[in-house]
Amino acid sequence: MTTAYILALSPQARKIYDHMKSAGSISAREAMADYGITSATLARRVCDIEEQGFLVERETRDHPIHKRRYTRYSVRGHETDRTAAGKKPGVGGAATAPAQVSGARRLKAGDRVVVTNHPSIRGLVGVIEAANYHLPYPLGVRVPGAHSGYGNGHYLMRVSEVERVA
């Protein structure tokens, strides 16, 4: 079942996914050393993996020698595995993946959404005005009554920050 979701990943995201499945997890240092992938690109590819419905766990650690904080990413299954087992998608420490919200189809302009993971406007309902999945913040969401730095309640958000409203 998840094979189709794996095939939908970009080649770079598939390398990261394969590494996480075989080694258990990946850090920015490993991504750079093994694949030449920067930490920002790694974070974006992890979001791409989540957008396909995979449950990705993030663990923040302190390096044992120089004490710098870093994040390890690991795949904990696919949201279809959780729903097939009768469990609620997104529960269990993993970030809410867009496929859990959108039923394996991407959010698009005109979709009504509720903001779930944005500190200043959590719980408010908005409308997606633009969606460009090639950007780090792919959704342009208008939230009436909210005031953002972009003016008139316009926010740039990640897919994991919203849920589709029926």
Image (spheres, rainbow, N blue to C red):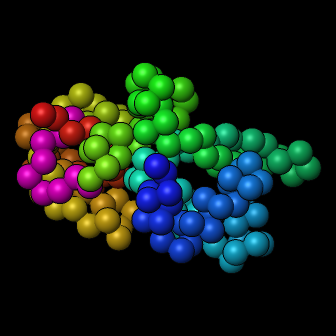
The quarter holding residue 165 reads top left
Does residue 5 appear left or right of residue 119 in this picture? right
- The residue depicted at 75 percent of the width and 41 percent of the height is 61
Residue at the outermost bottom position: 36
In the image shown, does 81 or 49 lie closer to the viewer? Answer: 81
Residue at the outermost front position: 1
Residue 101 in percent (x, y) is at 30, 40
Rendered-image quadrant of the C terminus: top left
Residue 47 visible in rendering = no
Residue 110 visible in rendering = yes
Query: In the rendered view, would you say 23 is above or below 30?
Result: above
Magenta stretch: residue 11 in it?
A: no
Query: In the rendered view, would you say 92 is above or below 43?
Result: above
Residue 42 in percent (x, y) is at 58, 63
Does residue 63 appear left or right of residue 10 in this picture? right
Residue at the outermost right position: 65
Query: In the rendered view, would you say 80 is above or below 54?
Result: above
State which region is magenta.
106-114
Please give the count of numbered marks on the rendered protein.
0
- The residue depicted at 89 percent of the width and 45 percent of the height is 64
The dominant secondary structure in magenta is: loop
- The residue depicted at 54 percent of the width and 74 percent of the height is 11
Does residue 78 appear left or right of residue 125 in this picture? right
Query: In the rendered view, would you say 77 is above or below 29?
Result: above
- The residue depicted at 31 percent of the width and 33 percent of the height is 116
In the image shown, does 85 or 71 lie closer to the viewer? Answer: 85
In the image shown, does 123 or 154 lie closer to the viewer? Answer: 123
Residue 111 in percent (x, y) is at 13, 48
